[in-house]
Amino acid sequence: MRKNEKTLTPKLIKKLWLAFVLIIVLMGASYIVITAYLANKYNEETTQRINANVATHVINEKFQNESPFLEDGSVNKALFGDLMHDMMAVNRSIEVYLLDNSGTILYSVVLDHSKNTPSKSVDTAPIDYFIKTKGQKYVLGDDPRNTGEQNIFSVAPFTIQGREGFIYIILAGKDFQAVSDNLFGQYFMKLGFGATLLTMFFAALIALLSIWFLTKNLLLITKTVRSFREGDLDARIENPDDSDIAIFANSFNEMADTIVDNMDKMKSVDLLRRELIANVSHDLRTPLAILKGYVETLQMKNETLSEQDKKEYLQITHDNIDKLSKLINQLFEYSKLEAEQVTPIKEPFSITELSHDLIAKFRVLADKKNISLQLNNPEDNCLVFADVSLVERALQNLIENALKYTEDDGTVTLSLLKKGKNIEINISDTGTGIPVSELPYIFDRYKQVDKSTKKQGYGLGLAIVKKIMDLHDTTITVFSKPKEGSSFIFNLPAYQVS
Ligand code: ADP
């Protein structure tokens, strides 16, 4: 692997390892603490259950023939001395207490009296619980030798010579605790250390495997991303679905497609914009130059020109002003549509009525060329749901074109046909037609099929129509044969009167 082909940076690897070691150490520590706590509890519970009856045994054994109290009411120390003897022989770790009913310590048998001043009483609540559950439930009682601490115990009540009390035995006395703590410490240090090491080993193995898997897959993706970045726009991850990180691979491929698409779109938009600016400046310049020429002639030769010439020159000036204002209006309209500043206000309206109005409006122009302008509307009244002024604008442009590109004595027909939930609108002419090779481009702004016909228009009319169709989520189709004529067809949703 070359150095620059590494997929994970040393910084990231360092971070990963650091996080990994930290987690393992935390895991190890938690493991030790939990295990120690549970094992200690387990040990205490077992000891308590096994020795649950120790206190009862002491009472049965020692108090059968002798009372724990002397006749004067004081504690029978001799009896407890005897008990101490037995304890020394059997179990040095336990501590025996003689309690009265309220938990006050009357006497204690503890081998090591050197440490701490024992407390004077113990809480009776754990004692009651112990007796109630017959010592089968884990419970801690006050440890008189370590005030404030609690320990496992065994307890049994007695009633002798009218006196009631308890024999309360702390099962894990000081010595036991020290030895047990020490053992626990050693044992669990070993256990914890061993467990941590083992966990670390296996976790390292898992981490290495995962990093290897990830790197293997990432390497392929990194290589492709790098090629793409360096300009190879065709670079894609091959068979992305076979990769272990298919979602990532597919996302990259989709992202690359989108970037390339957008770049293409931006390039073509940029190209069209430049073309538009070049053409607009040309188209503005020509009528302006003509205007300037005629106005100057009128100014200079005003005296010598005949009335007829003057009339003609003024007419030419007028026509060119018309052309200029038409172009400027179209540009304004188109740029507003392109900048998406126009929001269609859709409402139901009669497309039949609108068509009648338009036919009437263009009648004069048609008559001038002796063109038969007809409306073909088999239904009585077709209603559509659309923006009336935008649809009017589109129809106007289409009829204008049809009349413009149709020779004298031709026919232009506007047909309205109900088709399912739509009204199909068709503007057909018997004009010059459009060459097949040019058909795909006629809706592109500023494209003119035949540059020689440029004097007739500016190539913005159909681009505006296309934008209006887009705003109505519909499309316009064109059928055309050179020398035979053209048809422009689009659909608008019919409005159903309920
Ligand atoms: P223009 O203002 O030049 O007419 P349009 O955008 O309206 O611009 O039309 C673009 C081009 O499509 C026209 O220049 C013309 O070559 C062609 N075209 C449009 N309508 C027709 C038609 N009915 N018959 C023949 N050619 C047409």
Image (spheres, rainbow, N blue to C red):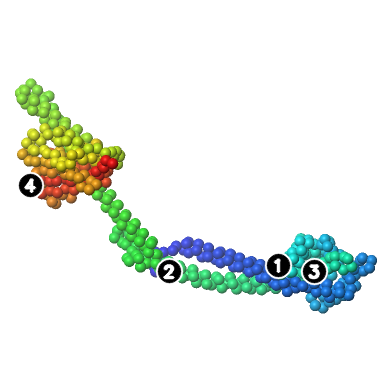
Describe residue 393's horizontal placement relative to residue 313 as left or right.
right
Q: Quick one: label 4 or label 3, which is nearer the N terminus?
A: 3
Extreme right residue here?
72
Q: Nearer the viewer, mark 3 or mark 1?
A: 3
Question: What is the quadrant of residue 411 in the picture?
Answer: top left
Asked whether the residues under the numbered discs 1 and 2 touch, taking CB atoms below 8 Å apart as contact, a structural biologist would say: no
Q: Quick one: label 2 or label 4, which is nearer the N terminus?
A: 2
- Note whether ligand 1 is within 8 Å of mark 2: no
Measured in 3D between alpha carbons, the distance from the residue under mark 4 to the one under mark 3, in whole angstroms, is: 122 Å
Describe residue 167's horizontal placement relative to residue 22 as left or right.
right
Q: Which residue is mark 3?
A: 156
Q: Nearer the viewer, residue 283 or 462?
A: 462
Question: What is the quadrant of residue 55 in the picture?
Answer: bottom right
Q: Nearer the viewer, mark 3 or mark 2?
A: 3
**344 versus 245 height, above or below:** above
The secondary element bearing badge 4 is classed as: loop
Tell me which residue sits at (67%, 73%) in the image: 186
**231 versus 444 height, above or below:** below
Q: Which residue is mark 1?
A: 138
> Residue 229 in the image: x percent, y percent?
34, 58
Extreme bottom residue here?
89
Q: Nearer the viewer, residue 432 or 295?
A: 432
Which amino acid is tagged 1?
A: Tyr
Q: Which residue is mark 2?
A: 213
Tell me which residue sits at (5%, 23%) in the image: 306
Describe residue 310's horizontal placement relative to residue 53 as left or right.
left
Measured in 3D between alpha carbons, the distance from the residue under mark 2 to the one under mark 4, in whole angstroms, is: 68 Å
Q: Which residue is mark 4?
A: 483
> Residue 49 in the image: x percent, y percent?
72, 72
Tell me which residue sits at (11%, 41%) in the image: 412
Q: Quick one: label 1 or label 2, which is nearer the N terminus?
A: 1
Asked whether the residues under the numbered discs 4 and 3 touch, taking CB atoms below 8 Å apart as contact, a structural biologist would say: no
